Amino acid sequence: MTGATEPMLTADARARTLVSSVTERLRTGGSPSPRLDAELLVAHAFGRDRTWLLAHPDDALAPDDAARLAAWVERRANGEPVAYIRGFKEWLSLRIAVDPRALIPRPETELLAEAAIEEIAGRLVRDDRPIAAWEVATGSGAVTVALAQRFRTSVALGRVRLAASDISPEALELASENLAAHGLAGLVALGCGDLLEPAVLPAPQQPDVLIANLPYLTTEEASAGTGSLRFEPRSALDGGADGLDVIRRLLAQLPARLAEGGVALLEVGAGQADAIRSLVADLPMPAEVGTLADLSGIERVVRIDRA
């Protein structure tokens, strides 16, 4: 590399100089957050976090690490997500390993995880029987890791049974790796299959709490491939012409699979909540539909309570 990125290749390249150089390179490369990306990548090259980086502006990077940073910067300038370059994403106070096998956990999915945690916790207070929770399309396993960590003791005591599934064997492998990395291996039943097809809960048990972040982009949006979408698995993004194809199929399975009195929590896209209300109203089961809004006011989580 030449020009603005040269300082990162020198043996005495200081942290503050690197951040400035990388920021400029990523700005010209079209990154929507060049300064943040630069701080994350430079800190990663030092083997530290952003807090350390900001407190050590005069520390120098070794030549080999500088060369590696230069390669990372070019990958980011070409649009690759920082999370894939670093190999992890900080999410809900967890360090989730990520790579192209699964989507990168989004901030809005924290709302889904928090809703599931609140629902399970409430049921533990009200009910004496075991509570079965199942995350469909677990991807990296981020939500399931959050649940297993929060309810580790309840799972060990048999009060909560956790299950997770995905249609992608590669994504399920990544979820398994994340559970193991957090010391949660063996606490979650894993199954590979389409939606509610895999038998991950002991027969004939049905889920009391069903959690799903299914593909909800339209085919047009997924095909546009802007930002990180160009690098993430298309099958986890494309929800068909209106973004609801996979969600429709899951909803159709709820009458046969969701326990009576059970709750389904679905992350959805902007403007999709009303369509899902209509779809639920046509199901052969009594149900109430509510929503939770994210910080932007978007109805992001749909809650379906089976009467």
Image (cartoon, helix red, strand yellow):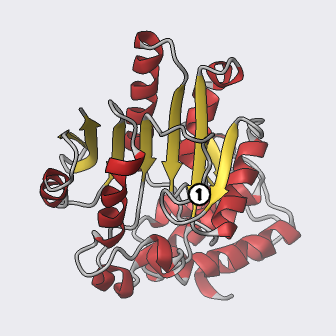
Residue 43 visible in this rendered orientation of the protein: no
Question: Which residue is found at the position 35% from the left and 43% from the top?
Answer: 265
Q: Image point 72% across, 70% down: which residue?
A: 69
Q: Is residue 148 in sight in this rendering?
A: yes
Report the number of discs. Answer: 1
The picture places residue 231, in percent across and down from the top left corner, at: 54, 78
Q: Nearer the viewer, residue 21 or 44?
A: 44
Residue 292 lies, with reference to residue 28, above or below; the image says: above
Q: For the residue carrying disc 1, how many other residues have a C-alpha within 10 Å: few (<14), some (14-19), or many (20+)? A: some
The answer to whether 145 appears left or right of 8 in the picture is: left
Residue 174, percent from left and from top? 70, 59
Name the residue located 71 percent from the left edge and 49 percent from the top edge.
178
Whether 159 is drawn above or below 212: the answer is above
Nearer to us in this view, 302 or 221:
302
The residue pinned by badge 1 equals: 198
Q: Please state if 242 lies on the left or on the right of 43 as rendered.
A: left
Q: Quadrant of residue 86?
A: bottom right
Q: Is residue 73 above or below residue 197?
A: below
Q: Position of residue 168 (x, y in %)?
A: 61, 69
